[in-house]
Amino acid sequence: MHRIRKVAAMGALVLGGLAMGSVTTFANAQDWVPSRYGADDRMGAANNLSADGVLAASQLITTGKVYSLGIDTEEGAPAYGGRTYDIDIVASGANVEVGTDVVTSNDERVTTSFGIGSQVDGLGHLGIGNQYYNGLTAAEIVRDDGLAELGIESIPPIVTRGVLLDMTRHLGVAMVPEGTAFNRAEIDAAARQQGVEIRHGDVVLFHTGWMQLLGVDNERYISAQPGVGVAGAEYLAGLGVVAIGADTPALEVIPFENPQRAFAVHQTLLAKQGVYILESMNTAELAGDGVQEFMFVLGQPKFKGAVQVVVNPIAIK
């Protein structure tokens, strides 16, 4: 059995504790509860999806090229906290006679955390002081057999316009250094340089080149990264985007902008704004082809009550 041997980011332990609701309640939720989508809402920014958005996104398909945005989930992959992935193949062993045929088969038995590799974070993943999206408390939603509300199964299919902001191109580097924050000035500047406009209902992805480290220097890959800052997260949420992702394992900038506020971007997007987070997105081929906008398609597996799940989103150009 291969296990993750080292966690380099101390904040990962904080993330695990917040996600499990193991900290003392301290949040003053008056400024973010109820959500802009109503006190009873459980979908967050997925409310910004629409049939018109699907049709508009379909008009972006000009070549029919399909891009896989997911990476392989495998044993020994770098991951936060105590997350692990283990797979065993269960073979039929002896021949099984079925009529005139001799049938052999393989099944698998997987023991895993869903927060490994390419993943979507649901709104029940991270809270602030035991309060989650729309003020739902850990006592209200956390159950041994899965979340009672805000589970990953509640995310509708996400089919909409996707926008790639190539920060390597914008900054003129092959790989953006760790600790580089993307806030409103950086986001607007990159969008202007590319000639794209971020719109209501979009999925926004950042290409940083960080995935070049995967399998080469996993410790650096998981311990620090460039990424979205708090003001950038607030800005994009205010534009009405559905989800934000990057080719990094945690989306947000690490080291954190404020060392006293661990995973403040996760707090902002998931708990306060209801915006979904896409981590470890394989954006290299999109960036290499100069693709800036595309049709984004995600239908996540419906593991009822899960807080996050491994995904393989598709971009179509």
Image (cartoon, helix red, strand yellow):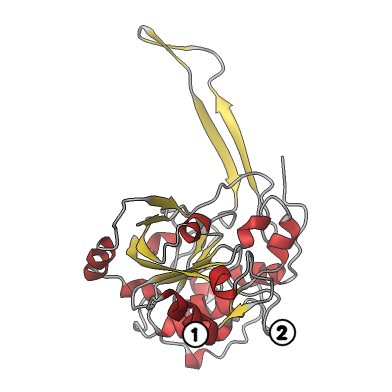
Left or right of 176? Residue 153 is: left
Q: Nearer the viewer, residue 297 or 195?
A: 195
Q: Which residue is mark 2?
A: 260
Image quadrant containing the N terminus:
top right
Q: Is residue 145 visible?
A: no
Q: Where does the image place residue 107, in percent across and percent down from the top left?
A: 51, 30
The tag earlier along the polypeptide, 2 or 1, is 1
Residue 44 locus on image (x, y percent): 39, 75
In the picture, residue 149 is in which quadrant? bottom left
Circle 1 residue: 234
Mark 1 neighbour class, 10 Å CA radius: few under 14, some 14 to 19, many 20 or more:
some
Residue depicted at x 46% and y 78%? 193
In terms of depth relative to the viewer, which is nearer, 35 or 263? 263
Q: Is residue 75 visible?
A: yes
Amino acid carrying label 1: it is Glu
In-image side of 127 versus 122 (left or right): right
The picture quadrant where one finds residue 247 is bottom right
Q: Nearer the viewer, residue 312 or 260?
A: 312
Residue 35 found in image quarter: bottom left
Judge whether 314 appears above or below 37 on screen. Answer: above
Considering the numbered disc 2 on the image, is that residue within a helix, a strand or a loop?
Answer: loop
User: What quarter of the picture does the C terminus occupy?
Assistant: bottom left
Whole-number angstrom distance, CA of label 2 to CA of label 1: 19 Å
Assign a secondary structure to mark 1.
helix
Mark nearer the viewer, 2 or 1: 1
The percent coordinates of residue 91 (x first, y second) are 55, 24
> Which residue appears at 68% of the width and 79% of the height?
256
Residue sitting at the far bottom: 30
Type of amino acid under label 2: Gln
